[in-house]
Amino acid sequence: MNSIPMSWYLVFSIGLFCIGLFGVLARKNAVAIIMGLELMLNAVNVNLLAFWSYLYADGMSGLVFVTIVFAVAAAESAVGLALIISAYRRRNTVIAEDMNVLKG
Amino acid sequence: MATEILIWLIPLPPLVAFFLIALFANRWRGLSHYLALSGAGLSWLGSMVVFFTAISREELSKNPIISSINWLPTADTWLKLGVQVDPLTVVTLFFVAWTVLMIFIYSVGYHNYGQPLGDHDHPGLPPHGAHLKDEHGHEHRVPSVEPMYSRFFGFVALFAFGMFTLVLTDNLLALYVGWEIMGLCSYLLIGFWFGKDSARKAAVKAFLTTRIGDMFMLIGLVSLYKITGSLSYSQIFSEASLQLLTSNASPIMGLSWAGFIGLMLFIGTVGKSAQFPLHVWLPDAMEGPTPVSAMIHAATMVSAGVYLVIRFFPIISAGWVPGEALTTTMTVMAFIGAFTALFAATIALAQNDIKRVLAYSTISQLGYMVAALGVGAYGAAAFHLVTHAFFKALLFLGSGSVIHGMEHGVLHTGEEIDPQDMYNMGGLRNKMPFTFWTFLIGGLALAGFPLVTAGFWSKDEILTGSFSGGFMAVFITLALAALLTAFYTMRQITLTFLGQPRTHSAEHAHESKWTMTLPLVILSVFAVSVGWAGIPKAFPVLGGLIPPWFEEFVGSMIESGHGEEVISHSLVPLATSLVVSLGGLTLGWLVYSKVKSGQPDPLQKALGKIYSVLKNKYYFDELYQFLIIKPAFWLATSFTSEWLDRSIIDGILHSFGRFGLWVGRGLRNWFDIPVVNKTGDSLAEGTRGLGSVLRVIQTGRVQQYMVIAIAILVLFGTIFFLFSSGLL
C-alpha cells in the first residue's frame, strides 16, 4: 500500500509507545499503570504490523508474532489485575508508590 | 722387673683408700681409719722393700731404676709418666713413708676414736666434749670424737698419694701434679674445721700464697720443656741438655736459660716451703688439726719444696764448680735461705702459742736447707731435710699430745683458757712423761745438741759447708739463727714442761693414749739415730768409725762429688755449733725457768719495743694486706665488678635491648597502626560509606526503578547508535 508512507505509522507507534511509557512511569494508580502497559504493547503491535505490511507481506511470520503479542498482553493484564486485587486486599491501597516494602 | 712394678704401686694404696672412704666408708669411722691406715701401711711396706733393694745396688746414681710409659700425646712426641729411683728418691722415700705412717696412727688417737659423740658438736667445728655419767652418778666432761673423722682420713690419704707421686716420679710434670694435689689437700685440711672463720681464711691464704709460687714454677716448667723438649729427669740432666741450657741466654736480665729456669723453680719452692717473702701462710696454717700441721708443714709438703730444688740442683748450679763464684740462682737462694732462717727465728722468740713457735721454727729450718743448697752443700741440704722431717714431725705430734692433755684439763676444770698457750702450761713433765721425754729429744735435735741427736750432725754439716766454701755472711747468719733456735726451743720446753703448773688445767692434764705416744717414741728413735748415718770423716775421734754413708750415697748424685770435697778440716764450724747450741739451750733455761703465772715475758723487758714488733711478726701480714690484698680487692669489686662489668658491659647489653625496644615501638606506632591497620579499616569503612551512599537509590518504588532503567537504556542506545555510525 503506497499511499501512506511507512514512516507515519512508525511515528504513530513511537508516539503511542511514549504515551504508554509516560502512563506507566507517572500514574499513581496501579490499574492505570496496567492501562499504560497495554498501550505500550499495542504500540509495539502497530510497529510490527507496519513493518510486516510494507516489507514482508508475503509471509505469515509478522502476523503470527503479532497474534502472540496480543495473547500475551491479554494474559499479562489478567494476571496484573489479579495481582492488584491481591495487593489491595493486603494493603487496602492501589497506589503504586505506597508499596515500597523492598526499600533498602 | 718386680721392683719397677712395686715402685709403680707404692703411691696407689692411699689413693684407693681415699676413693673408698669418700664414696662408701664416710659414715663408719672405724672402717675409714682402717682403710687409710692400711693404705699408708702398704705404701710403707713397699717403700721399705724398695729402700733396701735400692741401697744394695751398685752405682745407683748412674743407673737409677727407671720405668716410664707414654701418657699424653703431644704432636709427634709423648708426655711420659714414670717412676725413677735414685739415691735422692730413696732417702726421701724413707722419711716420707715413716712419717706418714706415724702421723696416720697418731691421728686415730688425736681425733679421739672410741670416745662418744659430743653434746653440741657440729661437723665443721672442733669437738668440745661430751658429758658422761660414771657409775657413781658423777658427771664429767670427756673429750668427744671428731664428727668429721672419716673426712679427715680421706683427705690425708689423698695427701699421702700426692707426696708419694711427687717423690717417686721421673718427670717434672708428674711432680707438678703431686705438688698441686698436696696444695689442694693442704687447703682442705687447714680449713678442716670450716666452721671457724679463722680456719677458712687461713686455708685461702695458704692456697693463694703457694699459688703465686706455683705460677712461677709453671713458667719455669714450660720454659724447660720448650728449650729441652722433655720433662724427664734423665733427659733434662744429661750433659747435652745442661750444655744447651747454660750456653743460651734467656730474654730475662741476661740470665742463661739454666739460671732463669732455676730461679723460677726456686720461686715455687719459696711459696711451697714458706721462705721469705711468701712465708705468711705457714703460721696461719696452724689452724688445722695438729696431725695436719705435722704432716703438711713439717714432714712432707714443705719438704717437697726443698726436694724440688735439691732435685734440680744440676740446673741451678749449671756452670758452677766448687771454689768459684756462685751462679745467680744460687746466690739468691743463699741470701733468701739465710735471711729467712734468721728472720723466722727472731719471730719465734716472741710467740706464745706452742704450735706457732714450731711453725716459725719450720720456716727457719727450711731456710737452712735452702741456704745450704745455695752455697753448694748438696749432701748437707739433703741430710738436713731427712733429719728435720723426723724431729719436726716428732715435735708437732708432741705438741698435739700436750694440747690434748691441756684440753682434758680444761674439760675437767671448766676453765676458759687457751689450751695452746704456753703460758697456761708448766710442770707437764710429771703429768705426761712419754710426751716430755720424746719432746725433749725432738727439741734437742732441733737445737743441735751434740753427738746424740740427728739435728747436730746435719746442722754441723751445713755450717761446715758454708764456712769452708768461704761464705762468711751465710755462716754467721746461720750460726746466729742456730743460737736463737736453741734459745727458743729451750724456752718452749721450759715453759711447757718444767717448773710448776701455772693453771688448774695444767694440773689436771694427763698422758695421751698409746696411739699417740707410740709414734712419738718411734720418731724419737729416728731423731736420735738418723744422724749417725752421716758422720763426716774429718770429725775428731768419731769420724771414720761409722762410714759417712749418707754423703757418699746422696753425694754421688752430683757429678763431681761436691759432697765430699767441701768438707774441710777446720774445727771452727764444729766449735761454733757446739757453742751456739749448748749456749742457747742454757740461756733459754736460765731465763725461763723462774717464770710464774701472770708474769710478763722476760724478753719483753729485755727487748722492749722490739718485742712487740717480733710478736706481731714484723707486721708483714698488715703490710701485705695494705699493699696487695686491698688493691686486689678494690680491683675485683670496684674496678672490674662495678665499672667494667655492671656499667660498661651490662650497659652495652642494656643499650642493645633499649635500641631493640625503640625500633619496635617505632615500627608499631608509625607503620603497623597507621598503615597496615588503617588499610583494613578503611576498606571496611569505605565499603560501608559507599553502601550508605548508594542506599538512596533503593526506594522500593517500582516506577522509579523503571525510570532509571529506561534512562540508562536510552543512554546506552544513543552511545551504541553513535558508535556504530562512526561519529564517536
Image: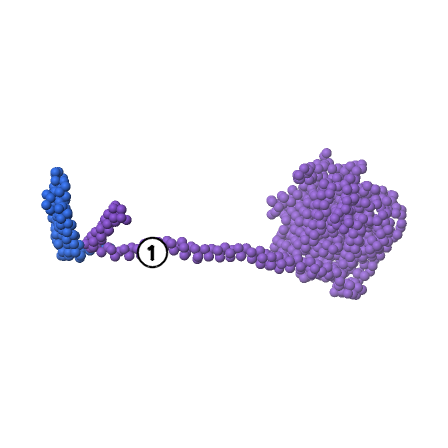
Amino acid type, mark 1:
Glu
Query: Vertically, is A65 above or below B115?
Result: above
Query: Vertically, is B173 above or below B190?
Result: above
Answer with the quarter of the image where residue B597 lies: bottom right
Residue B89, position in %: x, y?
75, 42
> Residue at left 70%, top 45%?
B222
Quadrant, the N terminus of chain A: top left
Total numbered labels: 1
Q: Chain of mark 1?
A: B
Q: Residues within 10 Å of mark 1 (few under 14, many from 20)?
A: few
Q: What colour scheme governs how the chains and residues are painted in the rendered image of this protein?
A: by chain
Image-based side of A43 in relation to B33, left or right: left
Q: Nearer the viewer, residue B510 or B319?
A: B319
Answer with the quarter of the image where residue B95 lies: top right
**Helix, strand or loop under label 1:** helix
Q: Nearer the viewer, residue B659 or B51?
A: B659
- Quick one: which chain is purple? B
> Residue at left 82%, top 55%?
B477
Answer with the quarter of the image where residue B583 lies: bottom right
Q: Which residue is mark 1?
A: B685
Q: Nearer the viewer, residue B613 or B533?
A: B613
Question: In the image as oriented, which residue stretches furthest toward the front?
Answer: A3
> Residue at left 75%, top 37%?
B65
Quadrant, the C terminus of chain A: bottom left
Q: Is residue B660 visible?
A: yes
Residue B507, position in %: x, y?
73, 59
Residue B495, position in %: x, y?
77, 59
> Residue at left 73%, top 36%?
B3
Q: Is residue B41 visible?
A: no
Image-based side of B47 in relation to A86, left or right: right
Task: Give the drawing colour for chain A.
Answer: blue
